[in-house]
Image (cartoon, helix red, strand yellow):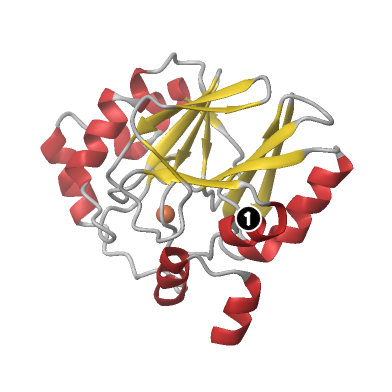
Amino acid sequence: MIFEQLFDEKSSTYTYIISSGKGREGLIIDPVIENTDIYLKFMNSMDLKLVKVIDTHIHADHITGLNELHKRTNCLKIMGENSKSEVIDLRVKENDKINIENLELKTIYTPGHTDCSYSFLLNDKIFTGDTLLINGTGRTDFQNGDARAQYDSLFNKILKLPEDTKVYPAHDYNGQKYSTIAKEINNNPRLQVNSLEEYVDIMSNLNLANPKMMDVAVPANLKGLTLNQIENKF
Ligand code: FE
């Protein structure tokens, strides 16, 4: 299997390139538009055909690479059914399967960070977007975020997976690449709560500034802008 984790320095975003092997179909999760050439160069070096791209949710801190990748490769753009993006080709719902050659991702609806957030399970790996981060959880104070929904997504869905499942988030700000369900249950400070109310209380008192890119990124991601369109607009 080919599994490549790439890091965008500017937004601290992790992007994942997945394929069952050289010369086969490939899929990308959470691409960043400025890195499109890097992704395509990697795909070429492995002789991969990009067939599907997924965003775990509408990002507020970077512009998605979904549309530029679609423009260049005609890959299918996938998000959860609640996404407000105007340009999604396939909207998945809970328990759907996303297939590429010899691989299958299972969709898990994990709202909370946003109301469109999905996680994706690939064998022993889960891509958690901004629902579960390493030693953290995604903020719930904009884009229809909801700490109660996030508690349910975490405690009743993601954390019920086998403890050795590897956790691959959409961001990390401390250089950590992945975690496991067991490590997060034991060490993640946000998960050391005894009740839903306690979790909601923590999330209501984070007092975070809005992401710098938010006013640019969210509209661009809803409209589905490509590199040319961004250059003309901003
Ligand atoms: Fe996010």
Please state, as top left, top right, bottom left or bottom right, where the N terminus lies in the image: top right
Q: What element carries label 1?
A: helix
Across and down, in percent, residue 225 comes to: 54, 69
Vertical side of 74 occupied by 225: above or below: below
Q: Where's ligand 1: which quadrant?
A: bottom left
Across and down, in percent, residue 101 comes to: 68, 25
Q: In which quarter of the image is residue 209?
A: bottom left
Residue placed most toward the observer, 198 or 87: 87
> Residue at image x 26%, y 40%?
150
Across and down, in percent, residue 132 comes to: 40, 38
> Residue at image x 17%, y 45%?
200
Residue 88 appears in the picture as rendered? yes
**Amino acid on which disc 1 is placed:** His
- Report the side of 85 relative to 64 (left or right): left
Q: In which quarter of the image is residue 128?
A: top left
User: How many tags in the picture?
Assistant: 1
Vertical side of 130 occupied by 206: above or below: below
- Name the residue that disc number 1 marks: 70
> Residue at image x 56%, y 22%?
104
> Residue at image x 79%, y 44%?
43
